[in-house]
Amino acid sequence: MQNPNPHAVLLASPGMGHFIPALELGKHLATHHGFDVTIFVVAADASITESPLFKPPQTPNLLNLVLLPPVDVSALVNSTASVVTRLVIMMREALPLLQAAISSMKSRPTALIVDMFGTEALAIAEEFDMLKYVFITSTAWFLAVTVHFPYIDEEAEHKHRVMKRPLDVPGCRSIRHEDTLDLFFDQTDRNLFSGFARIGMEISNADGILVNTWQDLEPSTLRALENEKFLGRVVKASVYPVGPLVRPVGQSSKSEVMDWLDMQPMESVIYVSFGSGGTLSAKQTTELAWGLELSQRFVWVVRPPVDGDASANFFNVTNSHDGTPSYLPSGFFTRIRNKGMVVLMWASQTEILAHKSIGGFLSHCGWNSTLESMVNGVPMVVWPLYAEQQMNAAMLAEELKVAVRPKIQPNAGVIEREEIAGMVRRVMELKGNEMRDKVKELQRSAHQALMQGGSSYNSLERVSKDCELNVK
Ligand code: UDP
């Protein structure tokens, strides 16, 4: 007997920052909008299966997770290829497996939802007569830049990166050259611009674009995107703001850091983390350690610097009696004993950000981390590293005014300890209340967007209605 529910197949690209929102989208579709969901996960390596997130979902009949075999792209791209190019190649290599999996399903799935690096898979949706959606795990502002990029690139005769002009996208705030995507600064990957332009075109030709944002967060950009004639060029796809889709706080797990947070005053601790893989230089890691030591209470998820002494990459290599790893200042653990906690490599971020003792977040501004900060009403110190994080930082600091930003771009030099301590103080003390009030407003509007009848809930209902019409 045929299943009456629409069946959405999701394709998530490698990296926790892509997998986490895809999983949350799948859960929302399955639990609130009547879908059966199968999520195919393309992984760079097998480590994702070690993550507690990659466990059988609680609604196994409605939501299935399938890990495609990891793809080793080292033989397929040259060593200077950018992350974007690598991701696109990994996704391309996974297509035959996806196609075989869909063709072996008992009934044809209704829709294929791919993230932006998987747009080549939309051809498979056409082959099986499925609806085609793209899921943007970032802002509507980033989407506007991406779908506009082919035209911007053409108008600038492919020289945008050397012209250093601000990026003007209709309906959006102008973007300073230094705040644009990091791909504008990549001088090594010759295929990057054409690959990104192709993605921009393919996204516009989908049936719908789901974005991990919400209506009240980016009203003017969404209006511009929904305008049928976006600067005279038709974006065929409908745009659906469906966020903020973030990992819910799990059952309060017992850990040293949560126990420590329990003992700290309300909103007194800054949480410091650079996402699932962000790292700093050895010099910047040292300077950040001193900066935090000059500041107030903190929890820091620390990673060994990439350019440091290779032997220091092991946590058990210390240069002091108190176990401080050798890439941190000697005696650091002793000096911060009463005011800070250091977590190595990975922490339960959503649990930490939801804790009442957290009053600020020093973040690399990955979009998931940014949303997690907003839904918990936590103001930020922004420290963007790569991808579209400069844009996120600009939006948080200058448009939404819920963050402070360093004077220099983090990648352009070392941010010194006094400035770090000053920024932390501004968020936690001086400007903290003003920013806190603003971010708490965003917290409320995020919550409303997802409630039954809220704007993001309604967006997913519209997707659901379209898919029901396509159930065959
Ligand atoms: N994350 C976490 N613990 C960590 C580091 C990251 O749980 O120690 C999670 C974080 O909550 C977020 C995701 O990993 O959901 C990182 O995504 P984001 O978009 O912020 O940055 P990316 O890792 O993609 O750069």
Image (cartoon, helix red, strand yellow):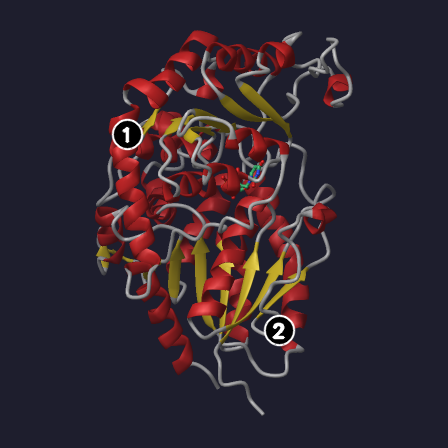
Q: Is residue 218 left or right of residue 281?
A: left
Q: Report the residue marked by disc 1.
A: 435
| For residue 469, above or below residue 11 | below
Q: Residue at x 38, y 64 (%)?
A: 208
Residue 271's x, y, as percent?
A: 48, 28
Q: Quadrant of residue 55?
A: bottom right
Camera-nearest residue between 15 and 244:
244
Q: Residue at x 43, y 69 (%)?
A: 32
Query: In the current view of this chain or complex, which residue is farthest to the front?
Result: 263
- Left or right of 308 on screen, residue 210: left
> Farthest bottom residue?
1
Q: Secondary structure at mark 1?
A: helix
Q: Nearer the viewer, mark 2 or mark 1?
A: 1
Q: Position of residue 220 (x, y in %)?
A: 21, 47
Which is more toward the observer, 371 or 250? 250
Q: Which residue is mark 2?
A: 102
Q: Amino acid at mark 2?
A: Ile
Reply above or below: 115 against 79.
below
Q: Amino acid at mark 1?
A: Met
Q: Distance between the Cα atoms at labels 2 and 1?
A: 48 Å
Check residue 445 in the rendering and tell me which mark sits there, or answer none.
none
* Residue at the image position 61 percent from the left and 54 percent from the top: 91
Q: Nearer the viewer, residue 309 or 238?
A: 309
Residue 416 in view (yes/no)? no
Picture quarter with the N terminus: bottom right
Q: Secondary structure at mark 2?
A: helix
Residue drawn where x is 46% and y is 51% of the image: 198
Callouts 2 and 1 close, C-beta under 8 Å: no
Q: Quadrant of ligand 1?
A: top right
